[in-house]
Amino acid sequence: MKVIISGYGKMGHMIEAVLQRRGIELVCASEDICAIPKEVARECVCIDFTTPEAFRANYKTLAANFKAVVVGTTGWYDMKEDVFAAFEAAGTPMIWGSNFSVGVIALFAGIARACQVLKGHGYTPHVEEIHHIHKLDAPSGTAKSIGVLIEDFLGEKPEIGSQRIGEVPGTHIAEFTSGVDKLTFTHEAFSRQGFAEGAVDAALMTEGLSGVHEFKDLIL
């Protein structure tokens, strides 16, 4: 497998280190993914960790030119239908996710199951997320995903709070409070390492894959 990284910030550098450690070829890391020659792109899986604005501008090129695409960028979910349609029309496999940490996927599973048990027993949900001051979208894509899970399985839409503090990699908290007790789920990332590992895992999963898939659906 050959990989091209779209976006060469902190996540891009960490993904590069994971690829190197695993012996996976990195063709290049680019801040201008549209400048990659089509003949080069067609042989590569693109891992995208850019900005919402960059992904909105680039997704049609990603779908048309690359062998497969892994999207870790968030903040574009209001246009999912257009993005998914572009990848389906091009026949390009896409794996997207609000979070590529396996620990967060386990958090999703735990919250979904807890909601099934708590439903109808008077619990009020709340979601809180804390990230570094450089994160552009708020609430985070992960927090929104947790909110959707809770609404689907508990039948109540939670309020979502966002905090931006220092260099916090990412903390997500889901609370369920009743008149007699409170249940809390917390995932705290110590670094971006888990996100990078999961993104590379997703790139490997694109081999032989077709269609558009959310990362958590391939894990759970």
Image: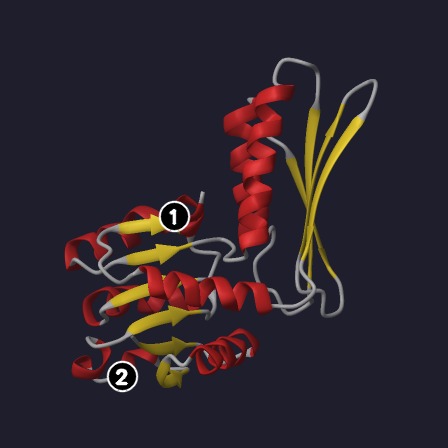
The chosen color scheme is: secondary structure
Q: Give the label, 1 or 2, closer to the camera.
A: 1
The residue under label 1 is which amino acid type? Leu
Residue type at the position of mark 2: Ile
In the rendered view, does 78 fall on the left or right side of 157? left
Residue closest to the far right? 180
N-term mark: 1 or 2: 2
User: Toward which corner of the image does residue 174 lie, by quadrant?
Assistant: top right
Q: Quadrant of the C terminus?
A: top left
Label annotation for residue 51: none
- Looking at the picture, tell me which residue is in the foreground, 215 or 125: 215
* Residue denoted by label 1: 218
**Dot 1 lies on which element?**
helix
Question: Which residue occupies 39% across, 76% down?
Answer: 6
Residue 132 visible in the picture = yes
Q: Is residue 99 left or right of residue 91?
A: right
Residue 71 percent across, percent down from the top left: 40, 62
Residue located at (60% from left, 43% from top): 107
Snapshot quadrant of residue 76: bottom left
Relative to 83, say whether 220 is above or below: above
Q: Position of residue 69 (x, y in %)?
A: 31, 65
**Crowding at label 1, few (<14), some or many (≥20) Cα neighbours within 10 Å?**
few
Asked if residue 112 is positioned above or below residue 100 in the image, the reply reads above
Q: Which residue is mark 2?
A: 36
Image position, residue 32 (x, y; %)? 36, 82
Q: In the image, is 41 to the left or to the right of 172? A: left
Tell me the distance, in whole angstroms, between the alpha carbons under discs 1 and 2: 29 Å
**Which residue corresponds to the image point at 53% horizontal and 73% vertical from the top-left?**
11
